Image (cartoon, coloured by chain):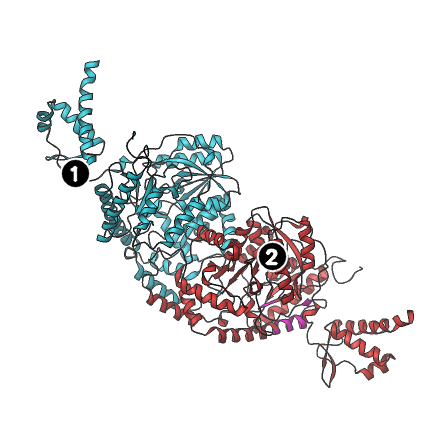
Chain colours: A red, B cyan
Amino acid sequence: MMSAMHTPTLYRQWADHYAQAIHSGALPPGERMPSLRDLMARHAVSLSTAVQLCRTLEREGLLEARPRAGYFVRPRRPLASLQEPQPSAPDVAQYVGIHQRVSEVLALSQRYPAKVNLSGSCGAPSLYPGAALRLATQRALRAQPDIFSQPLAMAGCAPFLQALAQHALDAQMTLSPDELVVTHGCTEALTLALRAVAQPGEVIAVESPTYYGLLQILESLGLQALEIPASPHTGLSLEALEMAARQCPGLKAVAVTPNLHNPLGCVMPDAHKRQLLRWCQRHDIALIEDNTYTPLYDAGPPLAAIKAWDDSGQVIVCSSLHKILAPGLRLGWIAGGKWHERIAMLKYSQSRPNELLPQLAMTDYLSSGALPRHLSTLKRTLRHQREQMADAVDRLFPAGCRFSLPPGGMSIWVELPGELSSLAVFHAALQQGIRISPGVMFSNAGRVDHCLRLNAGLPYTREVDRAMHTLAQVIEHTLNQAPAGRGKATHA
Amino acid sequence: MMSAMHTPTLYRQWADHYAQAIHSGALPPGERMPSLRDLMARHAVSLSTAVQLCRTLEREGLLEARPRAGYFVRPRRPLASLQEPQPSAPDVAQYVGIHQRVSEVLALSQRYPAKVNLSGSCGAPSLYPGAALRLATQRALRAQPDIFSQPLAMAGCAPFLQALAQHALDAQMTLSPDELVVTHGCTEALTLALRAVAQPGEVIAVESPTYYGLLQILESLGLQALEIPASPHTGLSLEALEMAARQCPGLKAVAVTPNLHNPLGCVMPDAHKRQLLRWCQRHDIALIEDNTYTPLYDAGPPLAAIKAWDDSGQVIVCSSLHKILAPGLRLGWIAGGKWHERIAMLKYSQSRPNELLPQLAMTDYLSSGALPRHLSTLKRTLRHQREQMADAVDRLFPAGCRFSLPPGGMSIWVELPGELSSLAVFHAALQQGIRISPGVMFSNAGRVDHCLRLNAGLPYTREVDRAMHTLAQVIEHTLNQAPAGRGKATHA
């Protein structure tokens, strides 16, 4: 037995050696690994040990195999390098406020003008069809001269509801226009969904980390956020959810972003989506799905919303055209499933129907057939920008930084080494005119305080590149100032 | 003593005789009363009895004196004819839901297409500067080509906030732009105000009757509405409020519409406004003021908001440009006083900032100086329409109907005779293609179930006149069907 264990130990030992060389920069990205023959000779190991060494590093994302050329150091630390969360039962003591923290971050962001704003989750204005929407707006103004003087009909704007129902087909959702309600962005949709299914004091399960806007809504409604660990690769941990639900028998809803999660960027596998849906159906727990980023997936055929499998109205899907078409418009929508009537009433009582003009302009745009072309360009550009930004993180940020390269959208999620505080980095970066979103905004549970979100929605200009250099220095500096035990080293 | 009482009894006897003749239509509106000489001869009474008879009927609003022409039957029953509420302590058992009732009325209203819609509280499209706002919108589109592609700044639209602060001066409020938040209409403003000051389960005092939208918001937020009787002449009864507050020590806010109350149309005297404010300050109870209709007052110099006297931030003022400029836009605002920070946070977390285009267009319009001219025309038109509709109520509706003729705005509030159910009238009228707002929407307490609100915002066309004839018949018919004891007669 001891002898059988020997070979793995040997390949692991050499794998660690090369991993260290790669992390330290001694073997820079793109560099060719010694060939199998070289490795055998240099370290006096068997062919199978040399093969296992390389395959292990490949699996760990440090090497890539190029056909007929051998192994090379991967140009950047890949998605896989983000750490998996420890599976654990949720800590109920984590029900603490996010408001104060998020409000402080937002207030500071307002106070200090940022030369380079990497804090958002939004494409640059040039990426959106602003001119087409302006023309569509002008057409709508001409077509409906009374548009500002007519009171709004309670039932909403029928052609826009129709266009949304058609748009939802892209994520494999078959929705009738009269099960939709137009909202002020996905934010109002989420607010209405939560108001519809839960009373103050009740508990909602959310991914950890999750979009800070969701945590703000929960807290402002007096709801409790129960954070369920999410994998940076597959999203919400269903095992952790089941454990949590046993602890919280009154769980009212699970709120998830299965496609292009914000901030992780990951996609929940279809099998998990179905499993989560069945679980929610079985326990009659509302499944609130944020579907905003789905159309920005660019690594394969279009993703399906969980709602696509919903045969019982258990899913409330919330979405918006904000991220894909018009960051300056607040055109969101909600399909409330079996809570539709209550949601429609809450929308009416909370803010009345949305104004017509943006809905008519958007209907005009959507029915022009321009969306697929626009989306294809948008996704190509965002992919390029994500790669450039990830490359910069990889080149410039200190060793020990891990990051995602998501299959769509505009966010890069970075884990800083050790327990480095992203809030310290946020403050220091803001002093240099650079705004980022610190991890502390995305979880009450302190699980991602050492992470930060960068916006790859902007073109990777020289100015952004300079900002990335500065940010790298800020992180390096903060790292050096971190008290012993908080950096990478485990002993002082 | 008995002899001294004789004369009053006599004039009262003849006054009742003539009042009955007027109510029955035997003496129609506009008809000349017999002269004093004729009365003396016809009824063998003294001159002083004849004079007292006429003065009594004049005081009771049935006659009017025309100089050098004598007394005439008043063309309509005047404002004073609406009944004062009985001063009484509130009944805590009145904390029942309005949702279901309002929702049913609204749903029915959606289902049956109304040929004539008298249910709103809104002017006809022709009364609003739609063309000017369209041009202003086009200018804003040209000036800001990126308007749909730029994400919205958290701080809102500075020029619009500035314009609103200036507009607020008309109601004698001195507000800084940075104590204002733009909202989706007054509805969202009221929602935010209530979310800011109270937690679910807590109690808010409201006028009874009050705007049904407010009752809906309260119920949807899980707040308790404590209805305080309001006089149709001076609004909220401060005595009743004080009695109620002693019963409800945890009262969190008082929500009022002091100027052109919806639905009563009355105006709270300035002395009451100041008294209410001081009372709220003394007890640290939030004073939520709906100021939407203030600019539509046309019976004297502009009215002041309660906020005008607020020296401690106790008043949260909610308003909107909806009723005065653009029923098709949802441009509301809120000045939150000492709750401003919390309100700004709640707005951000609930629906993010409002879109820019309508704000920029409205800023353009407001800064053009066109508002005073527009308001003056609007008020003149609305007054004329109110008078025409009140005249129709007076001419056509059965005896025993009382109604308001408010000093501004577009609502006519009608009390039906006895305990006639406005809901029955609503249903019957809807069958005839006429939509009204039944009193049952405006109170949980059942105090105004026999009332209804009519919209005088529409031009008094032949179609509206026909609808008023039909409505009168519907009321007459419902009255005849009313069970014994519910109509005017006190015995079967």
- Measured as percent of width and height from the top left, residue B268 is found at 35, 38
Assess disc 2: are there few (<14), some (14-19) or many (≥20) residues with their C-alpha within 10 Å of its C-alpha.
some
Magenta-span inclusion, residue A59: no
Q: Which residue is mark 2?
A: A281
Q: Nearer the viewer, mark 1 or mark 2?
A: 2
Q: Mark 1 sits on what residue?
A: B28
Residue B45 vs residue B23, the one in the foreground: B23
Towards the viewer: B417 or B332: B417
What's the amino acid at mark 2? Gln
Q: Position of residue A67 (x, y in %)?
A: 71, 84
| B238, B118: nearer the viewer | B118
Q: Secondary structure at mark 1?
A: loop
In the figure, B120 relative to A290: above or below?
A: above
Q: Position of residue A347 (x, y in %)?
A: 46, 53
- Number of dots carrying numbers: 2
Secondary structure under tag 2 reads helix
- In the image, taking residue A472 as reference, residue B348 lies left or right, namely left
The kind of residue on which mark 1 rests is Pro
The subunit carrying tag 2 is A
Magenta part of the chain: A387-411
Quick check: can you spot residue B321?
no
**Is B173 drawn above or below residue B282 in the view shown?**
below
Image quarter where the N terminus of chain A lies is bottom right
Separation of residues labelled 1 and 2 (CA atoms):
69 Å
Residue beneath the point at 49% across and 42% down: B223
Q: Residue at x 27, y 53 (%)?
A: B373
